[in-house]
Image (cartoon, rainbow, N blue to C red):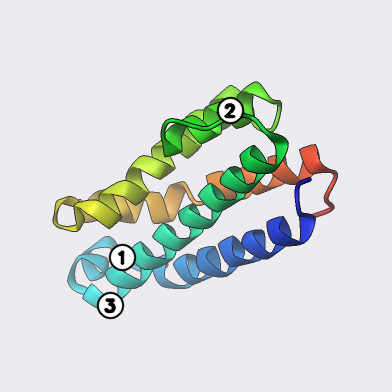
Amino acid sequence: MVDSDLILAKAGSVQRHLNRVIEKRNTDIQIFFKDIDRQESILFNLQMAIQNCIDIAAHIISEEGFGVPGSTNEMFYLLEENGYVGPELTEKMVKAVGFRNLIVHEYGKVELQHVFEIAQNNIEDLNEYLRSIFKKLGIAD
């Protein structure tokens, strides 16, 4: 059985990390390019927010018996197949996982322009994911 308290705790972590991104993203791109502390804060908090979304997916898949995903990306396809997220949101989450993997495994290859754009334009995708999960589970957000 899916543990709603665990889902809510993970969702709270997502929100805390996204709030830190929001605090740090409000700057000119040229300042962002020069501010290593700001860059690292945004990267870390994006990584952690995405990881908590992955953890939510893993918990649901395990508890609902949806099978063993072959990859992290496959988790979101399993959620889609079982009505937790729609196809468009699945693709957004797959992209988020790819970005997280880039941060974790190939830090030197992260393009700052891309990080800045994600911080400005894409963090709502994670909130959309949480709302979709809450709706399916009947959790009020």
Tell which of 34 and 87 is nearer to you: 87
- Of circles 1 and 3, the one toward us is 3
Q: State the residue at coordinates (34%, 63%).
A: 43
Horizontal side of 87 relative to 26 (left or right) equals right
Tell which of 51 and 31 is nearer to you: 51
At label 1, the amino acid type is Asp
Gap in angstroms between the C-alphas marked 1 and 2: 39 Å
Q: Which residue is mark 2?
A: 78
Q: Which residue is mark 3?
A: 37
Q: In what quadrant of the picture does the N terminus appear?
A: top right
**Residue 28 badge:** 1
Q: Position of residue 2 (x, y in %)?
A: 75, 47
Name the image quarter holding residue 72.
top left
**SS type, badge 1:** loop
**SS type, badge 2:** helix
Q: Find out whether the residues at labels 2 and 3 contact each other: C-beta distance under 8 Å.
A: no
Q: Is residue 75 visible?
A: yes
Name the image quarter holding residue 98.
top left
Q: In what quadrant of the picture does the C terminus appear?
A: bottom right
Q: Is residue 125 above or below residue 112?
A: above
Q: Is residue 128 visible?
A: no
**Residue 136 badge:** none
Horizontal side of 57 relative to 23 (left or right) equals right
